[in-house]
Amino acid sequence: MPLFRTATSLNKNIEFNVSGDNERADRTIINVLSSALMHLLRNSVDHGIEKNEERGQKGNGKIDLDFSKEKDGLLITVSDDGKGLNRKKIEEKLRQIELLSDDDIKKLSDLQVYDFIFQPGFSTKSDVSETSGRGVGLDVVKKNISSLGGSISVVSDAGIGTKFFLRIPNIVSTEDCLVLSDLKTIYAFPTRSIQWIRTVAQVDFQKHSTIRSIVHEKNIIPVHNASDLFGNLAENVDDLEEKIILINMNEKAFALSYKGKLSYSEHVFDEPDPLVSKLPFVSGTTVDQDRNIIFRANLEKLFEINERAA
């Protein structure tokens, strides 16, 4: 991974954690965010985390990337437990480029001072490296986030670390989906969550109590019937072969048996209305070109079935 290669080249040991990465966003938003996030992460390694000999008992540097929903938008937090931003160095740079007077600088809060790192060409680093310093290129990050109608802000504590907050409003989810189209109520699953699809003959079933099960990564995974969870199958599917679908995400797995047609298509899902949201396994809704309502399956709720049975 480029992040770890960068850390190794700078003599820094890091731990990188991602949480909430099942949040969804339109593909255009993802394309813009990917470069912005990589820049922020590389800056955390280069300018935030100290070298191994400087950290002492703090141990490995920790960098966290967190995604969470904020109303109808997306909140992304990039944080590190490094040395934090240096207010004095930022003030020195402001004096050097004569952007503000000493009196004006003294009146600024820490947050107002830190916001200057998003100014074009602003950097407190005297040397230029492959990864550059915090501030070099952050004006481009801010410009790209602004193009989505979003905002970026930063907070920092000396010796504790730095957090960047990216807020993106009005996101929608464009997803490639596997659609179970022969259910009377049609459900879709993001293809990124599908581990494999096999016929019954291709699956080595285990006998776990009275339920068919499979073994996945040394874990026993019960096989659940799609029609039991999502409603009856449509008519005229008796001649179709039963398939087993293994869903796998964030180290959680769920196995589904389904006898019906499968199709692949791309959909934009909206938040379910209050009535639909009461259904146990729905996280989004859309309507296809034939005016069929399609529900996006709530994977977390499905995984909870196995957790309760464990």
Image (cartoon, rainbow, N blue to C red):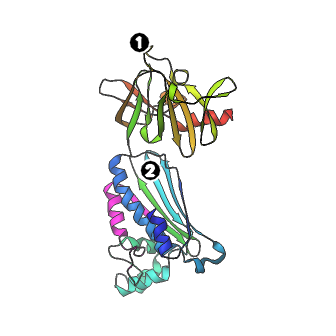
Front residue of this view, candidates 173 and 1: 1
Queried whether the magenta region covers residue 162, the answer comes back as no
**Three-letter residue code for mark 2:** Leu
| Horizontal side of residue 52 vs 76, given as left or right | right
- Which residue does the image show at 52% across and 40% down from the upper left? 248
Q: Is residue 270 above or below residue 101?
A: above
**Image coords of residue 123 (percent x, y):** 39, 78
- Badge 1: residue crowd in 10 Å (few <14, some 14–19, many ≥20): few
**Three-letter residue code for mark 1:** Asn
Q: Give the CA separation, mark 2 to mark 1.
A: 43 Å
**Image coords of residue 16 (percent x, y):** 54, 61
- Which residue does the image show at 53% across and 29% down from the upper left? 256
User: Which region is colored magenta?
Assistant: 128-153
Front residue of this view, candidates 105 and 20: 20
- Which residue does the image show at 48% across and 22% down from the upper left? 242
Residue labelled with disc 2:
74
Q: Is residue 30 above or below residue 219?
A: below
- Which residue does the image show at 49% across and 46% down from the upper left? 22
Q: Is residue 212 above or below residue 115?
A: above
